[in-house]
Amino acid sequence: MSELRFETMKIRGAELGEESCVPDLLGEHILQNDLKFYLDETDEIYDGYGRRKNAYPYRQYHSYTRELKEKEMKTAVLENSYLKAVFLPEYGGRLWKLWDKTTGVNLLYTNDVIRFSNLAIRNAWFSGGVEWNIGIIGHTSYTTAPLYTAVTETDTGAPVLRMYEYERIRKVPYQMDFWLEEEDKVLNCRMRIVNESDDVIPMYWWSNMAVPEYENGRIVVPADKAFTNGDGVVYKVDIPMVNGVDVTDYQKIPKSVDYFFAIDEKKPKYIANINKEGYGLLQTSTQRLKAFFLGKRTGVQSLAGVFNGQSRKIS
């Protein structure tokens, strides 16, 4: 049997504090907004499309602390015989843990604390789990904010966790459904963005997944080219070898850097983080996905599925 239940968990965390009393008009400095693009004509067709300098009408979170105290947080738990998924509805619906019950392994990197730093368009951001992002570059406006949460079910009667909101920058509602059928060995995630206007809306959607950095681990992705950046410039490189380094062997990458893997439209859309035995997390998507992303960080990897383009009537 698959089940959905609502619980609480205890974790050491910092206080988020109140929102700023004034709107965000000047905006936080977002490095990506200053990038230049040296790409082929077909690659840069959406260069800077829909770029925003601020998070208006959202307000900033400037009042958070760094002091850690034990806190109790609400969770939503999806579970069947094979997987256990733990979500944080009060923090953008983040998928905090994904346990493989057959091995007892958490396939994600789950931080042991929730501590905020200035890394998002509303300032406050925290690391770990899977962050669901919509709107503009710079993480989602709801990364530290609660989402509406509901319960529904599939045609077979399996419970579905539904989280949704209205994104005020792009003026679109979005909805995220998660479920596990009784015999599923993968977590089903269905994202829905609805453009209710007649206008073309710039859209940037990505899921940011923090995963462990395994000793002798690898990234596996069906691509032979990737977009990366250096010295404020975005450019395209052949992979896996970049400047004499096999970037799929992430421990050999000398410094923090991002690679957006350009997957051919005819190839399956997936990326995997595996250990030396070939075990790990596989993320896969339907054909609408445009790219997969690897962000090299110390001790932790970020995997992401990215859709970047325009929306007319997406559902």
Image (tube, rainbow, N blue to C red):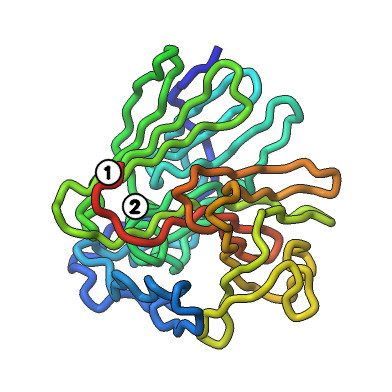
Q: Is residue 302 above or below residue 274?
A: below
Disc 2, SS: loop
What residue appears at the point 36 percent right and 75 percent down from the top-left corner? 48
Q: Amino acid at mark 1?
A: Glu
State how many labels appear: 2
Please name whichever residue, 244 or 101, is drawn nearer the observer in this view of the structure: 244
Tag 2: Cα neighbours inside 10 Å, few (<14), some, or many (≥20)? many
**What is the CA distance from the residue labelled 2 to the residue labelled 1?**
9 Å
Residue 103 appears at what percent x and percent y?
76, 30
Q: Is residue 124 left or right of residue 9?
A: left
Image quarter (top left, top right, bottom left or bottom right) of the N terminus: top right
Numbered mark located on residue 142 in the image: 2
Tag 1: Cα neighbours inside 10 Å, few (<14), some, or many (≥20)? some
Task: Mark 2 or mark 1: name the one nearer the start of the chain.
Answer: 2
Q: Is residue 47 left or right of residue 98?
A: left
Identify the residue under disc 1.
165
Q: Is residue 44 left or right of residue 310?
A: right
Residue 50 appears in which quarter of the rendering? bottom left
What residue appears at the point 28 percent right and 57 percent down from the top-left corner? 18
Q: Residue furthest front?
A: 266
Residue 186 appears in which quarter of the rendering? top right
Please name whichever residue, 233 or 149, is drawn nearer the observer in this view of the structure: 233
